[in-house]
Amino acid sequence: MSESLVAAGATYRSAERVLTLLAAFEDSRPELSVTEIAEALGVHKSTASRLAATLERTGFLARAGRRYRLGVEIIRLGTVALRSADIVATMQPAMEKLSQLTGETINLAVPAGPDVLNVAEVPSTYILSSSGGWVGRRTRPHAVANGKVLLAFGAIPAPASLERYTEHTITTPATLRAELARIRRDGYATAVAELEDGLVAVAAPVFGPGGGCVAAVSISGPAYRMPPSQLAELGQLCAAC
């Protein structure tokens, strides 16, 4: 067996153990000892202890004396999941209408810590499109239209670093601040070849019952079908959606 296959097998087993461990917590037993974790996983106590310590460092578990309970990271992910499910159900009809009007890919994104998480997509009607693979994908906010919207309207904090993906990616804080001010003024964001050459997107905020920005809806497609002269019109369609 090759080394790569051995490594892949070990990674799979580790992931399986993590999921099994997290699933072992229930209402009837919200806390587990190392011994109970080892029994749930069918491993030695030393292995269970190392795994629990790793999950504690990353926020998925928390200490409760000599026992463990679910950590704040689990709460955060659960909140994102519940919020995302509600927003998707609410936004789906509007996203489908936007797709009918434009023929392009429509995406819905929500905050995920400092990143942007795509939670729903209506695929393009064109053969050549940006459809597929977006749902579940996390992106850095400064390089994508929906991320800029979430930044501009305070849904996520300003990024600590501005990675470059193409020659058009915004990489300086001053330029980003100016861009976010424009987005707040116009009500929509654009990203022209900033994440990937040839990919263009526009996005607008989705406001929740309390008035805060809770998500962003975007239209994306190839540059030749979304030229600069059409971006304002597409941005206004997003905002209306």
Image (cartoon, rainbow, N blue to C red):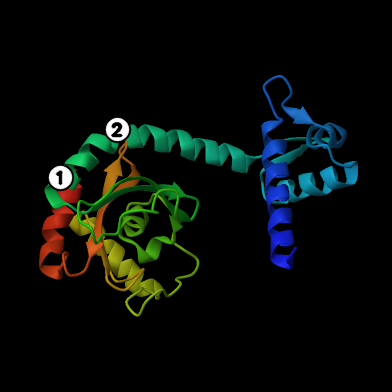
How many neighbours does mark 1 have within 10 angstroms: few (below 14), some (14-19), or many (20 or more)? some
**Along the horizontal axis of the image, is 124 left or right of 146?**
left
The answer to which of 81 and 6 lies nearer the viewer is: 6
Q: CA distance from mark 1 to mark 2?
A: 17 Å
- Is disc 1 placed on a helix, strand or loop? helix
Residue ranking furthest to the top: 28
Residue at point 36%, 68% (across, down): 195
Residue 14 horizontal/vertical position (percent): 72, 49
In this orientation, does residue 181 appear? yes
The answer to which of 123 and 45 lies nearer the viewer is: 123
How many neighbours does mark 2 have within 10 angstroms: few (below 14), some (14-19), or many (20 or more)? few
Look at label 1 and name its amino acid: Gln
Q: Contact, CB < 8 Å: mark 1 with mark 2?
A: no
On-image quarter of the C terminus: top left
> In this figure, which residue is indicated by the disc labeled 1?
100
In this orientation, does residue 191 appear? no
Residue 190 horizontal/vertical position (percent): 25, 63
